[in-house]
Amino acid sequence: MSSIPGYIDTCQSVHNGQVTSALTVPAPAVETCCTPLTSEALSIEDAQRFAQLLKAVAEPTRLRLVSLIAAQENKEACVCDLTEPIGLGQPTVSHHLKILVDAGILHREKRGVWAYYSIVPGALERAAAVLSPR
C-alpha cells in the first residue's frame, strides 16, 4: 500500500483479474488540542494571595467599603465616616476593614483614637491585571 498526501492510504483489490486502487477516507486535518501559554501562569503563592484578595472583595459590605473609600476626594476615610453609609455598627465595619487590610487592599493609619483607611496604591490595578487577558 502507498500513501497519498491528504489520504490515509490506498487499497488495492483484484477483481476479474484486474488490479484496481481505491482511495480510503481522507485523513483528518491536524489540529492542536490546546493553545500554548503565551504568558506565565500564576505561581502558587501569587494564586493564594490573589484568592485572598478576591475573597475579601467578594462580600457585598466589603465591596461597598472599598467603593466608598475610593469615592472620597482624598481617597481615604475614617471608620467613623463609614458606619452610617454602610448601616452597620463600628465594630462590624472595623472587622470588614481589617479583612481588607489583611488582603492588601486597604492601608490603615491610626490618628489619635481614629483609624483612617486608604486604598493601597496599585492593589486594585494588580487584581484587574490578573483577570484581564494578556
Image (cartoon, helix red, strand yellow):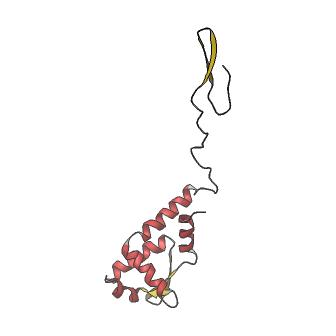
Residue displayed at 52% across by 63% down: 49
| Residue situated in front as seen by the camera: 8 or 82 | 8
Left or right: 116 as drawn, with respect to 96: right
| Residue situated in front as seen by the camera: 114 or 120 | 120
Residue pushed farthest top?
Answer: 17
Looking at the picture, how far across and down is residue 113, in whole percent? 43, 89
> Residue 12 occupies which quadrant of the picture?
top right
Looking at the picture, how far across and down is residue 98, in whole percent? 43, 75
- Is residue 115 placed above or below 123 in the rendered structure? below
Residue displayed at 48% across by 67% down: 53
> Residue 44 occupies which quadrant of the picture?
bottom right
Looking at the picture, how far across and down is residue 50, in whole percent? 51, 64
Looking at the picture, how far across and down is residue 94, in whole percent? 39, 79
Quadrant of the drawing holding the C terminus:
bottom right
| Residue situated in front as seen by the camera: 23 or 81 | 23
Residue displayed at 48% across by 74% down: 101
Left or right: 127 as drawn, with respect to 17: left
Quadrant of the drawing holding the N terminus:
top right
- Is residue 35 placed above or below 24 in the rendered structure? below
Residue displayed at 61% across by 39% down: 30
Left or right: 22 as drawn, with respect to 110: right
Q: Give the number of marks.
A: 0
- Is residue 60 placed above or below 133 in the rendered structure? below
